[in-house]
Amino acid sequence: MFAALTLVGMLPCSAGTLTIEVGHTIGGQPLKFEERQRLEGNGEVAVTRLDYLVTEFALLTPDGRALRADGQASFLSAGQGRTTFTVPDVPAGQYAGVAFRLGVPAAQASKDPASWPAGHPLNPAVNGLHWGWQGGYVNLALEGRTSEAAFSYHLARPENLATVRVEQAFTMDEDATLGLRFDVGRLLDGVHVQANDGSATTHSAPGDALATKLRRNVATAWSFASFRVGSGITKAVAAAQIPKGTTAYVFQVPNGFPAPELPMDNPLTAEGVALGERLFHETRLSVNERQSCASCHQPEHGFSEPRATSLGTTEQAGVRNAPALLNLAWHSRFAWDGRRERLRDAATAPISDEREMALPLAQAVARLAADAGYRAQFAKAFRVEPEGAVTGERLGLAIEQFLLTRTGAAAKFDRVLRGEAQLTEEEAQGFALFHTEFDPARGKRGADCFHCHGGFDFSDHAFHDTGLAGTDGGRLNATGREEDRGKFKTPTLRNIANTAPYFHDGRAKTLEEAVAHYDHEVMRTANLDPNLAKRRKLELTAADQKALVAFLRTLTEP
């Protein structure tokens, strides 16, 4: 479609960086995420997800050329506040507008998703839009609720790539920001979202007329909003080098996993990881010196605990199940409600929590500092003098380093992907159910698991209300937003057979009980995830449920 030109190095004079700033609207009004708003012809709707990929961005010239930014790809998310991307080294001159693709072209879509570097927009750990080995990339995911139903529109497959052109003259002679508008109302023009019969959904199966309609609507949903000089983009801080005299820890990215974006201010060292492992098992970090991190996050149970809710150091009852601490290098928020944005903070919080280890952090530091062995180990890991080497900050950094190295990717399913093993007939049936949506309006009756449990880690690492009901506010406790009530982080399904019981409160004692919940026990809660709200029950047979459990067990390492 575009001329085979690149912006980088094309002309000797570069004006600077062009920042694209997208404003999301609905019916001409700013989109208020997860709040009910009027949508013409459909009453009130609340958008709960709007994620999409932008590729092949190009500048339109007055003489009709399209100058494409070489290799450009961007992930945007209204819910996550990711609404800008940049095009560097734009040649100075006059332009007639911009053009781009909404979605991933076949050449990029066919590339191994694990090959994208950490932080790249097409890295599945970044965008959450690569739904497993069969589904490939989703170009756009729009989900939400109405007063009567839920809707779930997933525009996927290369044939549903949408081309967008926004014509508006502007001149580039220094850094500038181009504002574009993406109207959800226009995207849904002619679409009946209030349907409660399963038709208010699409997963872009071949021949799906609704997917075709949405693809065509995309072109008219975009418009020009503004143009101003200046970008306002803050450049990233360069990654820190390991302390001189320490040994770099070589992080092994498992086959099929994308590169993680490791913390830039806490580089992994062999000394830091070893210290973190020792601290993880240190009982002196609890008030009565009886409990360590490993007491509730037991390695033999996938770094979780075979108890519904954990007991504190003095056997005081906790309120949530101990989550599995695996593959955290690919996570950006921690704990069931995501209240911690840094792993180091999540690692030290239980020490002072009166329901857990109940020891003030300052006292924990003092205990460790009184031990000459710890003083020497801290000094060696962080290359400081032994005197004063033990601090609360370094304690968290060391445990963070250790936890970042805990990966789970050696299950039977991984061997199947490498061609070293085969699924049994029952496991293959479970795999098919897992990756098939429940869409009876189009003759599909799968288990619909992959929407939340897709990809390399079998988790989107997002927060969902899965119809469990109860008094725990979930993510509401972290954000204070009523729209987050009852939402909990999607756990990884890796090593799932070793991490019973299940759900945030451990109510499901077995995998069979967990599967039964999604088959017929989902409650109609206020913030129920649209992918669950679109149906009342899956109607899986006993054999289907057994096959699904058989497949889930293939995700567990020996």
Image (cartoon, helix red, strand yellow):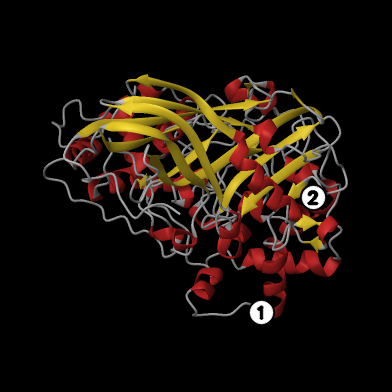
Does 184 sit above or below residue 492?
A: above
Q: Can residue 462 be seen in the rendering of this structure?
A: no
Q: Nearer the viewer, residue 290 or 171?
A: 171
Residue drawn at x 74%, y 23% as measured from the top left: 36
Three-letter code for the amino acid on which mark 1 is drawn: Thr
SS under mark 2: helix
Check the image and name the residue furthest to the front: 63
In this rendering, would 393 be left or right of 200? left
Q: The N terminus appears in which quarter of the rendering?
A: bottom left
Residue 75 point in image, percent of width and height: 47, 42
Q: Secondary structure at mark 1?
A: loop
Could you give the CA–CA distance between mark 1 and mark 2, rounded to whole angstroms?
Answer: 25 Å
Q: Residue at x 37, y 37 (%)?
A: 62
Q: Residues within 10 Å of mark 1 (few under 14, many from 20)?
A: few
| Residue 117 shows in this picture | yes
Q: How many marks?
A: 2
Quarter assignment of residue 74: top left
Residue 361, given in percent of the width and then of the height, sits at 39, 24
Q: Nearer the viewer, residue 298 or 366?
A: 298
Left/right placement of residue 111 relative to residue 117 reads: right
Q: Which residue is mark 2?
A: 517
Q: Which residue is mark 1?
A: 424
Which amino acid lies under the numbered mark 2 shown in the image of this protein?
His
Q: From what the image shows, is residue 496 above or below residue 317? A: below
User: Residue 308's image quarter?
Assistant: top right
Percent across and percent down for residue 366 are 31, 25
